[in-house]
Amino acid sequence: MLVTGKEILDKAHKENYAVGAFNVNNMEILQAVIAAAEETQSPVIIQTSEGAIKYAGIDYLSAMVHLAAKKASVPVALHLDHGTTYETLIKCIRNGWTSVMFDGSHFPLPENIAKTKEIVKIAHACGVSVEAELGRLGGIEDNISVDEKDARLTSPDEAVEFVNGTGVDYLAIAIGTAHGKYKGEPKLDFERLQTIKGLLNMPIVLHGASGVPEDSIIKSTKLGVNKINIDTDVRVAFTEGVKSVVTTSDEFDPRKICGPARDNMKKVVMEKMIMFGCSGKA
């Protein structure tokens, strides 16, 4: 069933667990994520980046996810990840996204508040939930690229000002994670997370979670993270699945190449859902 992001994450916030938000670019990834959610009986957030929309087409993605959600026995939300333009956000709202993220983290705080507030006003009028980001994560994800020197952690005081000024439904904060593959082990600022969660008392989002050690993920959920974004780990699982076929045989049937990749992704997604504590919460 297709639901809003707020519906999924308010429950996660109340019951103190996290829901996986998995980036989808094609049918096989979507099938793997939905199958994992059904097998673990987990609520799930299907994410599409601006890059995914450009690659697959907004109508294709919308139709696939709406069909998958209609057939699924678990709650499914369709979320725009890192929306940077007004046009993209409006197109997603018009095409059936139930949650959108406006990423104004590169703007000065007053401008970020003003722009986010306008998006919230429009989205809420259409029954769509809104995520925003405060602080800046380093690394690269699709069209988002932030040099390490420009990354900065989220200020608790600014977080309060931002949420009060915008009315967002959930907030992505920077506590030491990064987009893409890590060169070393990330060190998360758990004290900052705990402080922000206590001040806001709302769903908190963790971006750049692929590659973060399991103990850090579990601790983050216990301290109040309710949405965890996963992209790179699923991409790696897809690539490894394809390699397992193309490097050991002369197979040329796409079904027999993408099938093992889909199975591999499903396994990884299931492991994440169990780790996040959302298994059985559907």
Image (tube, rainbow, N blue to C red):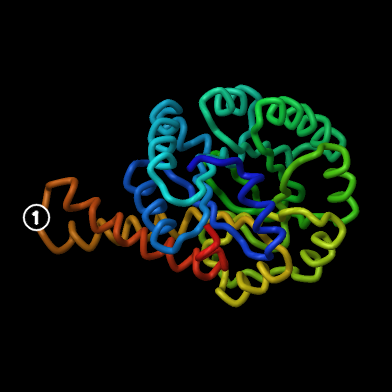
2 or 108: nearer the eye?
2
231 relative position to 169: left or right: left
Number of labelled discs? 1
Residue at screen point 67% across, 68% down: 220
Residue at screen point 71% across, 42% down: 132
- Per the image, the residue denoted by label 1 is 250
Q: Position of residue 72 (x, y in %)?
A: 41, 47
Q: Position of residue 178 (x, y in %)?
A: 62, 58
16 relative position to 73: left or right: right
Mark 1: which amino acid?
A: Asp
97 relative position to 55: left or right: right
Residue at screen point 60% across, 77% down: 215
Q: Position of residue 278 (x, y in %)?
A: 55, 63
For this orientation, the residue located farthest to the bottom is: 215
69 or 166: nearer the eye?
69
Residue at screen point 32% across, 56% down: 239
